[in-house]
Image (tube, rainbow, N blue to C red):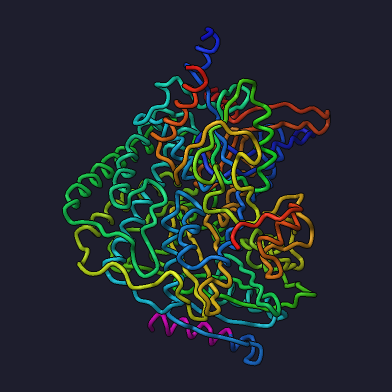
Amino acid sequence: MSVLEENNKTVERLTEHIGKKDVLEATVPRERRAFVRVPKERLLEAAAFLHDKENLKHVTTITAVDTGEDLQVIYHLRKKDLSLSLKVNTPYDDPKVPSITGVYNGAALYEREVYDLMGVVPEDHPDLRRLILADEWPEGVFPLRKEWDVKSLRKRVDGEEWGRNE
Amino acid sequence: MSEREYIIPIGPQHPALKEPENFLFKVDGEIVVDVEPRIGYNHRGIEKAMESRTYIQNLYIVERVCGICSNAHQTAYTQCVEEVLGMEIPERSKYIRVFVQELERIHSHLLWLGVAAHEIGFDTLFYYIWRDREVVMDLLEMVSGNRCNYAMPTIGGVRRDISKENFPMYHKMLDTLHERTLYYLGVCASEKTILERAAGVGVTSKADAIRLSAAGPTARASGVESDIRKDSPYLIYDEIPFKMYTETGGDVLSNVLVRVNETMEAAKICKWVLDNIPDGPIKEKFSPMSRVPEGEAVSLVEAQRGELIHYLQSRGENKPYRYKIRAPTLGNILTVIEKLKGGYIADIPIVLAGIDPCFSCTDRMVFVDEGKDRMWDMNGDQLRRYGIRWYEK
Amino acid sequence: MSLVTWARTRSPWLIHFNAGACNACDIEVVAALTPRYDIERFGAVIKGTPRHADVMVVSGSVPRKIRDRLKRIYEQMPEPKFVVAVGSCAISGGVFQDCYNVMEGVDKVIPVDAYVPGCPPKPEAILDGVVKLLMSAGY
């Protein structure tokens, strides 16, 4: 079986396990890459399935995207010959997602990073704290969100206009 | 077991190093009990900045995420953008990209080897290695015009060509590098000073390396067969015959052996590229204000320190909507914490250096005796000498 | 020139501080003490502690978190002291201008005496900068 066929089979098995109505998006644009979107309530199940049954034991990183309408959290999981990006969406006013650190121990720091920079709260994370921003950085100001640009961030954090490119 | 717990913050900076970081160590006598990483001293806000710059402007900021892995970042970036564009780059440019990437691997591993030798106190070796490293720096300067931050990959191919008249000289320099690295392999595997400080120190089992999602030479030193060049080949790595090196010890010595072997393998890959490079154009057209169609892509590259991932979401403009970079060292921090726990204070510098961190380790160290409310100072040089003296006893 | 000044300028002790740099400048500073460039022939030695240093060599665009540390290290240096800003980032923020976490240049935090431009500057340029600084200090 070619690599592409293998990847398709993996996505099919995941869809079967989660149930077709809960797999909101599933694409395999090329060999070794897959993108799957599920509702956040099914995240842990999908992650556990991929970890235990499909041998995707490595978490490369976790990305958070401000889509303009909500926050999207993408878990990049990997094994030999497949990098699968598992996406979930969560609303601005309730930005909680289940923490996958129990299944993927290596995700601990990545979840702290999205918490710090995007304000996504991983529930049941064993040690949820800031990771990257300074201690004196104001609470509730998440720099990667689209509501902020560099100028307004400067104004909010440094208290003065500090723009250069207009 | 003593009752007092000391907390040692190991602050940024090191005479030989890189990004500043901070580690808080809880110790019990001479043993490290727990470690807390405090990172973010080098957080510049690059991902946000990339959203307000065009794709060509971003080439130059992506390069400077790390000056030692600069080519790896540029390779990952250009690959990511080219995938969303659906652009296929000319064959010759793929060979040149591999050539520069492997040269950078040689330069980075030799740099690290010298620094690791310095951590153990073996300064003579440090100076020898860095003198020999100048050969690869000269080679890089000849090829690209700069010793660091070469800016060779660009969107659509590479910026500069390599000329055939120089190939005999490049071959000679690569042979020198191979020969010198072979000599250092012999030194590292047999010198008592090194073996004592590196063998059996900072051990991570294969199971732990997989559980904590370690990547790169750190994972390969524990026996995990993970190398993006084999797992998810990019450029022409699926055509090049090269060997992936793993060790089973999981200790600092295994890390050294993996990296030294990789350096020699990289020199071989470079020679293969020079012998097999096809003629042809080196660049596809991509103008500075071009838009990139809507789409997303994940780009994986085996950087010197491990697996590097770039992720792009484009919404059809000439600037990225969201760009994410995860440098390899972040993936190895959890592993290094496991390595440090249960070890001696004297081993801290070498274990930290062992994962080839893209951050700096020691300078200011403050010992806090919580019970007696005393504080006293030790600087980085003193901790290193402390480690050396400790082992001399 | 007094004997003390002569002694001071003939053997400057340097401390290198990485204020959030990408490391390219730092490895060129370290390369400056390796056999090919050999900063020691100028009597310069790189020390690990600010308390013994005459000259601080700083690289990096100064992210927020490191700002206070930079100030503290500067204050720990005994007089007379000099600061050399190495690389475009240390001079003006370099490519990192307009990044929300960057202070854009060392001279926004501590006074600087010499600027060595480049990205990264070659070790010869760094040596040149340090030597020029010493000469202007009364060598």
Q: Is residue A121 left or right of residue B111?
A: right
Q: Residue at x 78, y 62 (%)?
A: A140
User: In terms of image quadrants, where is residue B12?
Assistant: top right
Q: Is residue A114 above or below residue B267?
A: below
Q: Name the residue rendered at 80%, 75% in the picture.
A: A93
Compared to residue B262, the image places residue B241 above or below, namely below
Relative to B273, say whether C10 is above or below: above
- Rendered image quadrant of residue B383: top right
Q: Quadrant of the N terminus of chain B?
A: top right
From this viewpoint, is residue B384 visible? no
Q: Farthest residue to the front: give it.
A: A166
Which residue is at a point 61% across and 36% down the rendered structure image?
B344
Q: Where on the picture, by quarter, is residue A67?
A: bottom right
Q: Residue B295: x and y, percent?
A: 51, 80
Evaluate whether residue A33 shows in this view: yes
Residue C27 drawn at (x, y percent): 45, 40
Image quadrant where one finds the C terminus of chain B:
top right
* Residue most extreme to the bottom: A21
A51 in relation to B106, above or below: below
Image coords of residue B66 (percent x, y): 50, 51
Prevailing secondary structure of the magenta residues: helix
Residue A7 part of the magenta-drawn span: yes
Q: Position of residue B371 (x, y in %)?
A: 83, 31
Please provide the residue range marked out in magenta.
Answer: A1-14
Q: Is residue B167 magenta?
A: no
